[in-house]
Amino acid sequence: MKSSDDNDNLDKSVEIYNRINRLKAKLGREKDDRPGHIDEKAIEEADAMIVALCAECPNAIGGYLSELGKLWEEMRDMPESKERENTSRAIFTLAHEIKDIGSMCGYDLTAYFAESLRDYIHETELNMEAQRVIIQAHLDAMQVAFKQGTEEADGPMADELKKVVKIAIDKYS
Amino acid sequence: MTSTIYTEQPQPYDLSSFTVLLVEDSSYMSALMCSMLKAFNVGEILTCNDANEAIGVLTITQARKKSRFVTDIDIIVTDWLMPGGSGDELIDWVRAHEDDALRFMPIILISAYTTEKVIAMARDHGANESMVKPLSAKSLASRICTVIDNPRPFIQAPGFFGPDRRRQEMVLAGTNRRVMTSQELKVHNEKL
């Protein structure tokens, strides 16, 4: 029978597993303790792929923004319901996607507002009127930033758009 | 203790024998990361849209692992935030698995959230490495090399199973330092 001391030790016990390095063994380098590397040319090639995919970025962001607009049209006057919750989740996912792609491809200002919209939807629960104003402000800012081709997250245009969104947030949250 | 003296630089890693499971909900990001992994000459890349799909793939590959026609997965690269099952759910499932081939599997977590938040979350769920979007080829290559070169010991402690959360040996001074008894500490050294 275990004593209460044994149980205490069991609760606090720590086990350490020192495992064989299977990945290094698979590479046939199990006896080589030097840090390895990936071919510089392969890294350059991968970076070139990022650049090539970023050439498609405007189309992708444009498509997402248009989808976001449609979802918001549906959600704006929807009463509190499961459907509204699902639409809000879809907006969250799209905003997250725009943030990913925008920041990857240099559309920093669009990515900035997408991130703010994503975090706003995820982290706060506001009344319907506040939601309407704040989400609309984010969508408008993203559309303007994207259409004007404002890539930098700083500068007079960026500051102006950020100010407008901040006013909406401060007033309604 | 003897140390080997090397006269030449190591060759770049040939990852053609590796299989990577890539879990990413965004088709755009998934295509991009696939291309990057292909550029690194990764032999096989399996893609899933979310944690639930990845759990299905891992379950099937583990069930069939004795077949010589099915490749084991070597590294999981997963996004954090995915609508159909998130990266932390996937890590929790992997680390709680009874099969050693799964629960010790190297995992690289990718996220679009801020660095500190991701690092803390990834560490506490048992990810081996974490990286923040936007991605670069260099950062992905560096995480893969770290997973290969520096496999940290795994720790089983109350409420945690995963790679040692301490990156380096710390010398703790003072009388409050906790000294573990042999009953509390068990070390498993795997041998060839």
Image (spheres, grey):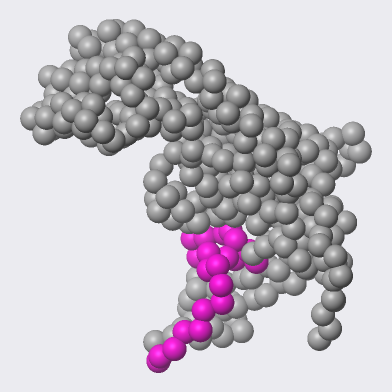
Queried whether the magenta region covers residue B191, the answer comes back as: no
Stretch of the chain drawn in magenta: B153-175
| Residue extending furthest toward the left | A171
Seen in the image, is A66 located left or right of residue B166? left
Point out residue A88 in the picture as x, y percentages from the top left corner.
32, 21
Judging depth in this view, the residue of B21 and B113 nearest the camera is B113
Rendered view: A2 above or below A37: below
Name which residue lies at 84% across and 76% down: B5
Point out residue B136 in the picture as x, y percentages from the top left corner.
57, 41
Queried whether the magenta region covers residue B163, the answer comes back as: yes
Point out residue B33 in the picture as x, y percentages from the top left corner.
62, 33
Q: Quadrant of the N terminus of chain A?
A: bottom right
Seen in the image, is A133 located left or right of residue A16? left
Judging depth in this view, the residue of B131 and A36 nearest the camera is A36
The secondary structure that most of the magenta stretch takes on is loop
Rendered view: B175 above or below B70: below
Judging depth in this view, the residue of A99 and B5 nearest the camera is B5
Q: Which image quadrant is residue A173 in? A: top left
Name which residue lies at 67% across and 62% down: B150
Residue A80 appears in the picture as rendered:
no
Seen in the image, is A17 located left or right of residue A168? right
